[in-house]
Image (spheres, rainbow, N blue to C red):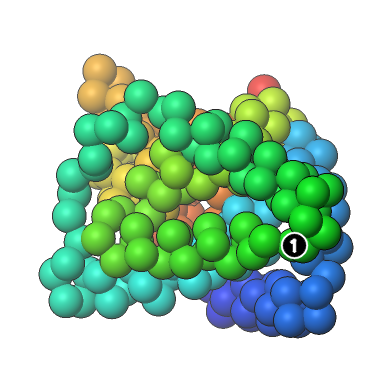
């Protein structure tokens, strides 16, 4: 599954670069809009498998850890969670106004791609995913209502917290009171990191509420 996921991510990254180089970024934005509706049914699969920022952040995170650049801290000014929404409004306004007034397409997507790489050199991926990414703000909103998501079988979970350590978006947390892991579908990218590391095979992709 790990290799299959990597291949899918690389294919989407190649598609993104091809559309970018051919000046067809609008097609990618259409794919993004479709992914928001897909998130209502299947969770944030766009973030886990199609997003070029997430795909580039994976090797960058590896480098950051390898060279001990990564810090566990989060900038204080990001913690209130408003930044990603401000980034979304500004990004849409810049795209719209530059096209309307100057008939040019400003490289908004490459800009955020660059930001994602720079931020991940220093901070944990969750900082970009949850607090900075303007596209993530929308994905969180739709992912919150997802009909299916990764979830934890509490009969099997032993609260070892291994899953917490590999989650790119802080979506899984062991609730101390119960000593059981819980997944927040709003933050979950539906990757397979937690599933692969769980020693009790307690994590499954299921319909929410079933
Ligand atoms: S890795 Fe598995 S057993 Fe350990 S806390 Fe996470 S879900 Fe529970
Ligand atoms: S590691 Fe698990 S909880 Fe975290 S994003 Fe991936 S599937 Fe979701």
Residue 32 located left or right of residue 4 = right
Residue 86 located left or right of residue 160 = right
- Based on the displayed image, in which of its 4 quarters is residue 103 positioned? bottom right
Counting from the top left corner in percent of width and height, residue 96 is at 77, 45
Q: Which of 64 and 203 lies nearest the eye of the viewer?
A: 64
- Based on the displayed image, in which of its 4 quarters is residue 193 positioned? bottom left
Counting from the top left corner in percent of width and height, residue 27 is at 85, 63
- Number of numbered labels in the structure image: 1
Residue at the image point whose x is 47% and y is 66% from the top: 114
User: Where does the C terminus fall, quadrant-wise?
Assistant: top right
Residue 48 to residue 65: above or below: above
Counting from the top left corner in percent of width and height, residue 197 is at 38, 59
| Residue at numbered disc 1 | 105
Q: Which of 90 and 14 lies nearest the eye of the viewer?
A: 90
Q: Can residue 199 be seen by looking at this rendering?
A: no
Q: Which of 102 and 201 lies nearest the eye of the viewer?
A: 102
Residue at the image point whose x is 42% and y is 39% from the top: 131
Residue 86 to residue 62: above or below: above
Q: Can residue 62 be seen by looking at this rendering?
A: yes
- Based on the displayed image, in which of its 4 quarters is residue 28 positioned? bottom right
User: Where does the N terminus fall, quadrant-wise?
Assistant: bottom right
Residue at the image point whose x is 65% and y is 75% from the top: 13
Looking at the rendered structure, the secondary structure element under dot 1 is loop
Q: Residue furthest left?
A: 68
């Amino acid at each position: 599954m790990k290799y299959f996921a990597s291949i899918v991510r690389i294919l989407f990254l190649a598609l993104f670069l091809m559309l970018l180089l051919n000046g067809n970024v609008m097609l990618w934005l259409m794919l993004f809009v479709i992914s928001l509706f897909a998130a209502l049914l299947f969770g944030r699969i766009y973030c886990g498998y199609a997003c070029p920022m997430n795909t580039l952040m994976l090797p960058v995170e590896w480098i950051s850890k390898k060279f001990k650049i990564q810090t566990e801290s989060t900038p204080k000014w990001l913690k209130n969670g408003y930044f990603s929404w401000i980034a979304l409004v500004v990004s849409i306004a810049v795209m719209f106004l530059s096209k309307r007034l100057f008939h040019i397409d400003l490289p908004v997507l490459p800009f955020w791609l660059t930001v994602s790489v720079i931020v991940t050199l220093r901070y944990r991926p969750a900082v970009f995913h949850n607090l900075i990414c303007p596209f993530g703000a929308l994905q969180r909103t739709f992912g919150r209502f997802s009909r299916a998501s990764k979830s934890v079988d509490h009969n099997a979970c032993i609260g070892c917290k291994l899953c917490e350590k590999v989650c790119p978006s802080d979506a899984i947390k062991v609730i101390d009171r119960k000593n059981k892991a819980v997944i927040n579908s709003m933050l979950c990218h539906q990757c397979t990191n937690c599933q692969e590391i769980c020693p009790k095979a307690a994590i499954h992709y299921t319909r929410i509420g079933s």
